[in-house]
Image: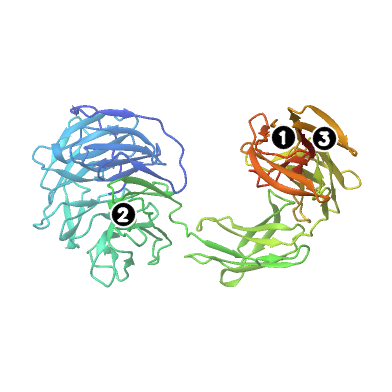
């Protein structure tokens, strides 16, 4: 089946059906699109070129679905049990459908989707439809009938097939450009009828393969094509003379297993195959046995094989701009696939270039443009170079195709970094457009970039200045200075972003509370590569200790001592910059034999206020001089966000 035409029917003598209506709005078309269809099966597909609509019958659900050229559903006609064959009136105002379950044909308004019904008394299960010379021809079983609704009353004529006894369901084919010719075939036989007069007159008959799912007639009326020919080696479409049904000397080979055929108004042929691992749609130009283009459906199901073309589910847009196909996957999901520019050879354009190159030195870009229909030498190609200086692309003019589809050209990249060469073929009346690209990593000079203060140690809260210096560059003179404090709770932050001064300098001030990695960043330009330098700087903590419970202070030499009675326990109150989980290290030493000796140290956890109280208990001797110190030790104090810092020594002595 393919799009057919018939004079507009009168509204008289019709029985309005109980078909339900769901309406929508039309949308724009898109290239090579696919959308899921709300159907459970596919009976037939026709294309309305006037209103840019596609109609698909769903026998299982008993409905017809109308979509735009992208597959967006516009309307649904329901209440049509077993609806199968479809055909259109010449003005595309009416859609005709064979309702197998009710032995009738319905006429659906293609704008409002309102349906009217014509009973076919005596015709059991009408299936396929064709419109030829003002009559709707339908197959029912192996029989042939016609419905004429051009007069005041509908006229139904049955049993018009008189060629031979047959079995199977009758398939029909015709073309509006070949008036009076109707092709019919069942599970074993093929026949050509003249239907220009009152009935169907047999012209010729012959054999047809039992696996045929669809047949069609060429626009010039000279050939009959079927979706299967098993007479030779390999899978192919059947091609027969419409005069005597002798088989054509050359075959149209397609993949396994052929199940659809549709012919465009200019004679271009679309053949379909039920192929899980090979192309599904094959396009042949008139007179050619080599496909000009092939389409391979993707796999949207849950098995290894790709989606399959539904039997007989191919149809051309009347202007030949698209082929519409219905596919199904292993999950039972059906999709409308819109295949654009099907009659155009689809070129493949490959581009190769060096992986790397030196800036300001010539490099060579090569490639090849291949197509099922080769393009001649001299075919123009456009070249665009995209780089840091021309991020939107710069035209390098037109290059020409050489012999054998090869091309090459030289270019001297003025900018470094990633340089992409895009080569494009604009397409023509016989070839689709194509493009390809290749990228080259072009060298850039390394700029001079320095940053002060590396490995400096600062007091807590100190505000040092960091000076970055940028050497010679091309255009970019911007430098960023970032600070990344130690500790996961503090994010990296931008201190300064700006243009360096005439000396190439830029500075930023940082409030030091933690060890910090400070980085200066130059993002690069077309001739100088990006560069980052860093300075790791350290920050001490604030630490102090106060002593209580002493009865006096006094000096021994120049050192102040805290005096305690022998039975009094000294209390040391240490304060330190707080950080979660941080501990102070408490160390004590005594003086004898002219030297200070470490007698012990221990870590004590800080409170959330940063304080730690330590009471000295136990036996002690009078007259012994002692001292203690509170320290933060990087890492062993529980964290690493500050630089090791020791507090001041506190001196004390016990008396009687």
Measured in 3D between alpha carbons, the distance from the residue under mark 2 to the one under mark 3, in whole angstroms, is 96 Å
Q: In which quarter of the image is residue 569?
A: top right
At 74% across and 60% down in the image, what residue appears? 413
Measured in 3D between alpha carbons, the distance from the residue under mark 3 to the one under mark 1, in whole angstroms, is 22 Å
Task: Choose between 45 and 603: the one closer to the eye.
Answer: 603
Q: Can you identify the residue that label 1 sits on? A: 576
Task: Choose between 476 and 434: the one closer to the eye.
Answer: 476
Q: Is tag 2's residue or tag 1's residue first in the polypeptide sequence?
A: 2
At 75% across and 40% down in the image, what residue appears? 628
Q: Can you identify the residue that label 3 sits on? A: 561
Q: Does residue 642 appear anywhere in the picture?
A: no
Q: Is mark 3 on a helix, strand or loop?
A: strand
Q: What element carries label 1?
A: strand
Of marks 2 and 1, the one in the foreground = 1
- Could you classify mark 2 by the number of other residues whose Cα lies within 10 Å: few (under 14), some (14-19), or many (20 or more)? many
Residue 226 position, x and y percent, is: 26, 59
- Could you classify mark 1 by the number of other residues whose Cα lies within 10 Å: few (under 14), some (14-19), or many (20 or more)? many
Task: Choose between 506 and 611: the one closer to the eye.
Answer: 611
User: CB under 8 Å between callouts 2 and 3?
Assistant: no
């Amino acid at each position: 089946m393919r799009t057919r035409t018939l004079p507009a029917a009168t509204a008289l003598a019709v029985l309005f059906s109980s078909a339900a209506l769901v309406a929508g709005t039309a949308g724009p078309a898109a290239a090579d699109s696919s959308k899921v269809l709300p159907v459970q099966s596919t009976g037939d597909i026709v294309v309305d070129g006037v209103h840019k609509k596609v109609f698909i019958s769903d026998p299982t659900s008993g409905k017809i679905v109308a979509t735009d050229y992208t597959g967006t559903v516009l309307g649904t006609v329901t209440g049509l049990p077993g609806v199968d064959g479809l055909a259109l009136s010449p003005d595309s105002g009416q859609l005709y459908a064979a309702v197998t379950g009710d032995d009738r044909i319905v006429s659906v308004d293609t704008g409002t989707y309102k349906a009217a019904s014509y009973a076919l008394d005596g015709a059991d299960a009408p299936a396929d439809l064709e419109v030829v010379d003002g009559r709707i021809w339908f197959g029912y079983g192996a029989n042939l009938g016609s419905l004429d609704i051009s007069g005041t009353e509908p006229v139904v004529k049955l049993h018009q097939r008189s060629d031979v006894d047959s079995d199977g369901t009758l398939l029909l084919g015709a073309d509006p450009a070949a008036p009076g010719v109707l092709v019919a075939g069942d599970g074993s036989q093929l026949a050509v009828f003249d239907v220009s007069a009152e009935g169907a007159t047999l012209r010729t008959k012959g054999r047809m393969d039992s696996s045929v799912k669809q047949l069609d007639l060429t626009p010039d009326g000279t050939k009959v094509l079927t979706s299967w020919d098993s007479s030779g080696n390999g899978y192919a479409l059947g091609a027969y003379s419409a005069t005597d049904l002798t088989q054509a000397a050359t075959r149209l080979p397609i993949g396994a297993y052929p199940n659809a055929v549709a012919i465009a108004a200019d004679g271009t042929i679309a053949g379909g195959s039920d192929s899980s691992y090979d192309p599904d749609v094959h396009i042949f130009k008139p007179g050619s046995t080599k496909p000009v283009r092939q389409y391979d459906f993707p796999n949207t199901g849950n098995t290894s094989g790709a989606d399959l073309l539904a039997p007989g589910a191919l149809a051309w847009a009347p202007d030949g701009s698209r082929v519409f196909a219905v596919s199904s996957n292993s999950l039972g999901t059906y999709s409308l696939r819109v295949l654009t520019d099907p009659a155009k050879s689809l070129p493949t354009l490959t581009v190769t270039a060096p992986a790397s190159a030196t800036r300001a030195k010539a490099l060579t870009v090569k490639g090849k443009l291949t197509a099922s229909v080769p393009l001649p030498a001299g075919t123009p190609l456009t070249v665009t170079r995209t780089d840091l200086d021309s991020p939107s692309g710069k035209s390098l003019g037109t290059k020409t195709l050489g012999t054998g589809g090869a091309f090459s050209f030289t270019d001297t990249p003025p900018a470094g970094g990633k340089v992409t060469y895009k080569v494009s073929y604009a397409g023509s009346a016989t070839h689709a457009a194509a493009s390809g690209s290749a990228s080259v990593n072009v060298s850039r000079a390394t700029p001079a970039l320095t940053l002060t203060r590396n490995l400096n140690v600062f007091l807590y809260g100190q505000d040092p200045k960091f000076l970055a210096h940028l050497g010679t560059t091309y255009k970019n003179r911007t430098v960023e200075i970032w600070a990344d404090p130690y500790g996961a709770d503090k994010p990296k932050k931008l201190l300064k972003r700006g243009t360096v001064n005439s000396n190439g300098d830029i500075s930023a001030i940082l409030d030091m509370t933690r060890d910090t990695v400070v980085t200066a960043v130059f993002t690069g330009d077309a001739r100088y590569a990006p560069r980052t330098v860093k300075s790791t700087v350290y920050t001490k903590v604030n630490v102090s200790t106060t002593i209580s419970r002493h009865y006096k202070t006094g000096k021994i030499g120049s050192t102040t001592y805290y005096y305690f009675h022998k039975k009094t326990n000294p209390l040391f109150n240490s304060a330190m910059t707080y950080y979660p989980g941080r501990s102070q290290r408490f160390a004590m030493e005594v003086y004898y034999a002219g030297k200070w000796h470490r007698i012990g140290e221990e870590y004590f956890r800080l409170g959330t206020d940063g304080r730690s109280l330590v009471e000295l208990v136990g036996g002690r001797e009078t007259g012994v001089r002692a001292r203690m110190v509170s320290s933060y030790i990087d890492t062993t104090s529980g964290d690493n966000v500050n630089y090791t810092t020791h507090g001041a020594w506190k001196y004390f002595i016990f008396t009687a």
